[in-house]
Image (cartoon, rainbow, N blue to C red):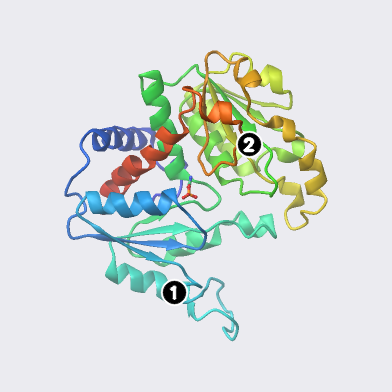
Amino acid sequence: MKHFLNTQDWSRAELDAVLAEAARFKRHKLGDQLKGKSIALVFFNPSMRTRTSFELGAFHLGGHAVVLQPGKDAWPIEFDLGTVMDGETEEHIAEVAKVLSRYVDLIGVRAFPKFVDWASDRQDKVLTAFAKYATVPVINMETITHPCQELAHALALQEHFGTSDLRGRKYVLTWTYHPKALNTAVANSALTIATRMGMDVTLLCPTPDYILDERYMGWAEQNVAENGGSLTVSHDIDSAYAGADIVYAKSWGALPFFGNWEPEKPIRDQYKHFIVDERKMALTNNGVFSHCLPLRRNVKATDAVMDAPYCIAVNEAENRLHVQKAVMAALANQ
Ligand code: CP
């Protein structure tokens, strides 16, 4: 039984098939691939796009989605084994995943890191526990990576450039300022899918502290070795933007400060000028801009960039619907 926990676990042929199916769903909305089937969407964190697109996606294909928010409208869940559960948690993931598997055909999980201890967060315990105990396929709806966003991003780029072959494109993943230290998931995922597609990828970030976890840097290096392209780390804004075909922005907290964010804040505050603006975009090769959304305007990117014709963030958000339908259809009918 196959899960969709990370794109790195899927072959390029499987990803290409999902993207092609997503493009078909974009042209023809309705299908019966989930007729009589259902998905539990388990949210430990807020969402607008993910929840809406999964719920509607299941509906479009004849299926049904049930949203659960443990600790809010469902019992709080224990994930550690051997715990004497005399605290806040009411039931163990072993029972939750097994019982849900008796009801539904797919389980989606959103569980962000706790931002206290990266060594613990990087184990992706919630997602891996669901995958361990569930007897139906599990879909990552964003944990420490965001593979559904990766597919939506890839499809938006393929649509923009009019080809599924993105090799040779100069791709810049730029860190941007945000008042809070955010999850590295979308940055990990952008690096993963851009190198998987064989692009020449630059990770632009303020200092070496903002380089991503070695697992994802390693995946990117592995992808370059297997698919061609390149991977460069830069701290120089103008040279990174020069000639770029794609600029993808995301903010994230510096990993060495996980659990001790106070000293990171004044460092982060020095780099507000990493905002994506018209001057920087003018350095590109008529490049496109995108972001996973939600985005704070005039903090991460200016109004002018967000409203420019080269901003494809809304199309990428729409594509979440199409790629997730393709993923659900593939997993529910394997
Ligand atoms: N990009 C994304 O996952 O959006 P939501 O957090 O609104 O689901």
Compared to 131, does 93 lie above or below?
below
Q: 226 and 57: which one is in front?
A: 57
In the rendered view, does 138 fall on the left or right side of 80? left
- Assess mark 1: CB under 8 A from ligand 1? no
Q: Nearer the viewer, mark 2 or mark 1?
A: 2
Give the image quarter of residue 252: top right
Q: Position of residue 103 (x, y in %)?
A: 28, 70
Amino acid type, mark 1? Ala
What residue sits 38% from the left and 33% below the top? 12
Q: Which residue is mark 2?
A: 300
Q: Position of residue 301 (x, y in %)?
A: 61, 32
Compared to 315, does 100 lie above or below?
below
Give the image quarter of residue 170: top right
What residue sits 55% from the left and 75% below the top? 81
Q: Secondary structure at mark 1?
A: loop
What residue sits 80% from the left and 54% below the top? 262
Q: 38 and 135: which one is in front?
A: 38
Crowd band around label 1 with a 10 angstrom C-alpha radius: few (<14), some (14–19), many (20+)? few
Q: Which residue is mark 1?
A: 74
Q: 241 and 269: which one is in front?
A: 269
What residue sits 79% from the left and 48% below the top? 264
Sequence-wise, the earlier of marks 2 and 1 is 1
Q: Position of residue 120 (x, y in %)?
A: 64, 60
In the rendered view, does 255 fall on the left or right side of 183? right
Q: Position of residue 137 (x, y in %)?
A: 34, 57
